[in-house]
Image (tube, rainbow, N blue to C red):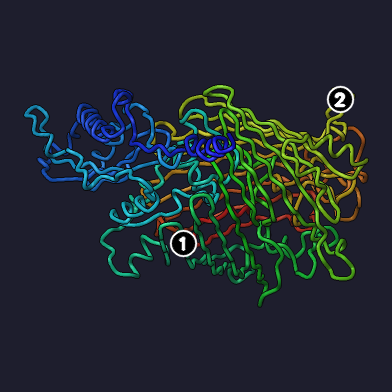
Amino acid sequence: MIKKLLLLFFVAPTLFFAQEEHYPVFKKCEEVSNKNLEDCFYQTTRTLFFKEFTTPKVVKDDNFSGNSTILFSVTSIGKFQLVYMNTPYEAVKEEVKRVFASFPEITPAWHNNHAIEIQFKLPISFPVDKDKGKLKKNIDIEKKEAIHLEQNLDFAKVVAQQKTSVGTTFFAHNSQLTIPFTHQRYVDYEFAMHKADGTHTASKPYRYTEVNKHFDLTSDKLQFVKPKKKTWIGRKLWNEHLLQVKKDDYWLTIDFLVDLQMGKDNSDIEYTYTNSRIATANGGLGEHLAFSTTFYESQGRFENYVNHYIKNPDRELFKPVSSEGLVPGRGKAKGFKINSFDYPVAEGYLSYTPNRYFNFQFGHGRNFIGDGYRSFIISDVSAPATYLKMDVDFWKFKYTSIWIWGQDVRETLANTNDRAHLRKYIALHYLSLNINKRLNIGFFEAAVSVGDQLDIAFLNPLMLYRQVEFNRGEDVGNALIGLTSKYKLTNNIALYTQLVLDEFSVGNIADLSDWRNKFALQFGVKYFDAFAVKNLLLQFEFNTARPYTFSHKNPLLNYGHYSQPLAHIWGANFWETVGIIQYKKNRFTGTLQINCGKKGFDFTDKTTSYGGHIYKSYDNRFAETGNKIAQGNTASIFISNLQGNFLLNPANKLSLFGSFSFRNFAIDTNANGFPNNTTTWFSVGIRSDLFNWYFDF
């Protein structure tokens, strides 16, 4: 009996987890035996493709004759996508994309107990003569050219070999790494995910595997590859990473990049510049673990109002320990030569994905939750911070938990012995739920605490933080809650909102001027491919935060990190509108952005807080009631920025750029770090598109 039980114990798991491997399966092939699935897939693909394919008129008019090869994939969700096609006609590519879009979704290929993406080659000859039945030889998918699904196949290796054959290698596209988040880069990804059903677009940055389900990253990059570049320098400048290694169970890419800018504003500063040397490494170890690390060694001199903010933001409330100021979004700055700053930055993370539902990250960097240009939940305007992140994605839900080890770097709070920064902890949950194919809603909560170590209760990913904060004691923490929504008006138009409550007085709900009614509100719209113009984005957004929102009785418990807000860069006590026009054509991207609004600052000769400075205690408030948005030392702000980018290398997003900005800041009385002035600034340079940098304050 014991022997039988032992046999059952060892054999049952083997049977239960036995590997099933098969090609993609059309519905008509479901009854076919596994060994004949390959032939059924080829034959059905061939029949469907040429039944739908129509030779474009321009090809017929040119009497073109020749051979082409279509490299296409069947994704891990069973969709057909064009990866690459060697043809001189863009119309042929568009027709092939249209044909594959008309294909039904099928059961994807299966390997190692999960669905995988697999690629195939389809030779095609022109002219295509369907009536004479000469298609079989021309379009038969040659088995020697197809990717085969075999026992113990390392699929990543095969994909890498196929992509190398068409010009370059993009190892990260099938990894669990995240795509560096910039608003300009993410337009295409958000549009593709918006059009699809059942997606979650708020939690950023996205992982490559998330985006690859809906947007063909490889095909998008291959259109910019220059296959004629055969020299080492030519390939590295235009097509490839500086160093790239691919083995059976690991891959690695290393790049040494630059952010070199030179400009001039209308102040007496001789010139502005940025000189960043960047080292970045990305890699994967096995199927489930990936890593990324980036180091920035930077010096710079900025337009005059930014320099003034760095050096004199507010000596008492902002000045960091052992530095001359704070570079927005980057960190502490040391003086460098004449009116310049040195500001090193390091970022990196590990990404672990044990299965299709979970992803864990531990690193030092920034996160963003929202569908807009700004976010009141968490944004990327502050300096990088150490964080632990968990994503759970299943059925109609995506659940994100982020734990942040933040710092309050103000000199007045530093430890008197070792001058160490004061540690603070921010924990947040965000639940995204797809109600139906058009409507998504999200629920948000966050808690802030200080102390020698993070309270273990905040590590519970399912706990309600407000209850934890309440049970720990009065005024020992700060909690926020919020609600988001996104509505798919059409395949091209998205409506989005955010509402964050820092505190709300139910008993005084009729009087919104009560200082306890602290909340922030956002609503916006994105119009992709606006007016049927491909790659044209129009975006409008309105943001407002009432006085004292994100602040606290104890300034240590505000919703901030590194002397900067964790939400909107303007802090609180403001309203703002944002308008964005972006157009992309081949390698060129042009963006026009306009910000305008009003914000209430404090007066420099008084200790009273009017609610805009989140690092001041709200105990020193202006009034109990009668509070209104932009109260106090009111400033009218208008900022416009026109920028053009020309992509050089699709592998590392190295680009040439030029920008012109205009800023008019009209304040009642000059405030520390925010003088009354008008700034014009022109800048050109070369850089990699790795992060958002906000100077629109």
Query: What x and y, as percent, mark residue 56?
Result: 19, 34
Q: Which of 2 and 44 is in front in this view?
A: 2
Q: Nearer the viewer, residue 407 or 628?
A: 407
Q: In this view, does 92 lie to the left or right of 27?
A: left
Instruction: Tell which circle, 1 or 2, labels the residue nearer the N-terminal end.
Output: 1
Query: What x and y, as percent, mark residue 387?
Result: 68, 52
Q: Which residue is drawn at 23% across and 34% down?
A: 39
Front position among marks 1 and 2: 1
Q: Which residue is drawn at 49% across and 38% down?
A: 17
In the rendered image, the vertical position of residue 560 relative to residue 62, given as above or below: below
Between the residue at mark 1 and the residue at mark 2, the CA separation in whole angstroms equals 55 Å
Q: In this view, does 555 lie to the left or right of 650?
A: right
Amino acid under label 2?
Val
Number of numbered discs overlaid on the protein picture: 2
Q: Are marks 1 and 2 in contact (CB under 8 Å)?
A: no
Query: What x and y, as percent, mark residue 349?
Result: 60, 56
Q: In which quadrant will I find the N terminus?
A: top right
Residue 252, disc: 1
Residue 270, disc: none
Residue under label 2: 506
Q: Which residue is drawn at 82% across and 51% down?
A: 615
Q: Residue at x 53, y 34 (%)?
A: 526
Q: Nearer the viewer, residue 60 or 40?
A: 40
Count neighbours of disc 2 (C-alpha within 10 A) and say few if under 14, some if 14 to 19, many if 20 or more: few
Count neighbours of disc 1 (C-alpha within 10 A) and say few if under 14, some if 14 to 19, many if 20 or more: many
In the rendered image, the vertical position of residue 652 relative to residue 427, given as above or below: below
